[in-house]
Image (cartoon, helix red, strand yellow):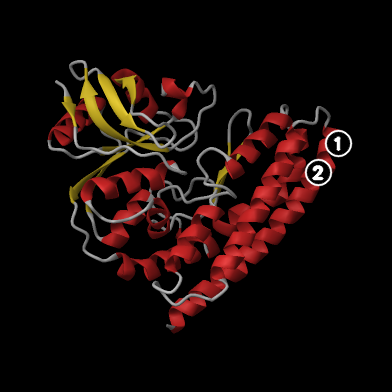
Amino acid sequence: MDATIAEYSHGTGRHCGSTSLRNLATHYGWGCDEETCFGLAAGLGFTYFELPESPHRGFIGRPPRIEETFFDLLEIGVDRHEGEGWRTVRRRLRDSLAAGDPVMVFTDIYYLDYFGSDTHFGPHSVLCVGLEDGGDTAVLSDTEFDERQRVPLERLRQAMNSTHGVPLSNRHLVVTDPEPGRSLEEAAPDAVAEMARTMLDADRATGPDGNFGTQGLAGVRRFADELPSWVEFDDPQWSVRFAYQNVERRGTGGGAFRQLYADFLESLDGSGPALPADATERMNAIAADWTDAGETLKAASERPDTERMGPTLTDVAETVHDLADREQRLYEDLLAALESA
């Protein structure tokens, strides 16, 4: 059975999660741009993890689950599903789309043929906005592409069931009550505080992914501690190249997501919570230095011998340790300002 949301407006963006939220905001009239969605999702973070094969390490500059945080802080009704059989998921896709509700699905891009990727990478969130060809083709709204993408439903099933990295287990979300219980202004202080506390305290990472990798500033420092030893991997060039991509590409918005968050802080200037006057300037500088570190990693990945690569990785590690210290001071200052307001 076909079911397509004709009135849905697709748009691209900088990061999959915040763009999917922005597109839902457009669909339901919440009035949020992408930067605001990212900030209200307490989207800045750091997750550092091991992989069973090359690239042997990975990280992402955000917590594992920002989308749920967005709905919680704005008190938007949403049904969360995970671990169900595919027949149940397929039926929910059909029923939700027939009712005019996009379904946020979490995928591994390896199985989304339009990416042409030979690397497993997820969770990549997209909105399913249609079923065609008797329900055998899924229509996806993906941040990376100007047009809606179509994939065989079987490939979407594989993408939603990937066990590479975070097991996805058919994870998906459907908005059930699109009327926010809190305004953006009410939610913003709590969102900034949640981000800062989670970065400062890795034990705050909760939920099914709470034990995945090392979270927050502890993850940043673990990355810096281990980076010089990456020359011992069997394919250090790819591991280092993947690190560059996780700083500057793969939907980060630049600077390991720090630039996206700096833009959110700038949007709050003068109208949001009482934050340190230099908070946006400091986050912009942190983002720029993450970008520089990423470009250095890119250059290091192009060196064929580890003897030349090793000293560069040591230099980047020192830079990342310094960035962790600067981020810690900023997050402590943000919390102090919010608590004294």
**Image mark count:** 2
What whole-number distance in Å separates the C-alpha atoms at marks 2 and 1? Answer: 7 Å
Q: Quadrant of residue 270?
A: bottom left
Q: Amino acid at mark 1?
A: Arg
Instruction: Single out the residue that lies furthest toward the right.
Output: 307
Task: Give 180 or 110, whichever is nearer the viewer.
Answer: 180
Quarter holding the C terminus is bottom left
User: At x 45% / y 84%, what residue is drawn?
Assistant: 340
**Depth order, front residue of 183/54:** 183
Horizontal side of 340 relative to 280 (left or right) equals left
Residue 149: tell me if it is visible.
yes
Q: Secondary structure at mark 2?
A: helix
Q: Please give the residue where the numbered disc 2 appears in the rendered image.
A: 312
* For the residues bearing labels 2 and 1, Cβ distance under 8 angstroms: yes
Q: Is residue 49 visible?
A: no
Quadrant housing residue 136: top left
Expressed as whole percent of the image width and height from the top left, the position of residue 265 reads 48, 64
x and y percent of residue 59 in the render? Answer: 57, 43
Q: Where is 329 relative to 140, above or below?
A: below
Q: Is residue 191 left or right of residue 218?
A: left
Numbered badge on residue 154? none
Q: Position of residue 7 (x, y in %)?
A: 19, 37
Instruction: Identify the amino acid type marked 2.
Output: Thr
259 or 172: nearer the viewer: 259
Of residues 219 and 136, the one nearer the viewer is 136
Q: Residue furthest bottom?
A: 340
- The answer to whether 6 is drawn above or below residue 29 in the figure is above
Q: Secondary structure at mark 1?
A: helix
The quadrant of the image that shows the N terminus is top left
Residue 308 got which mark? 1
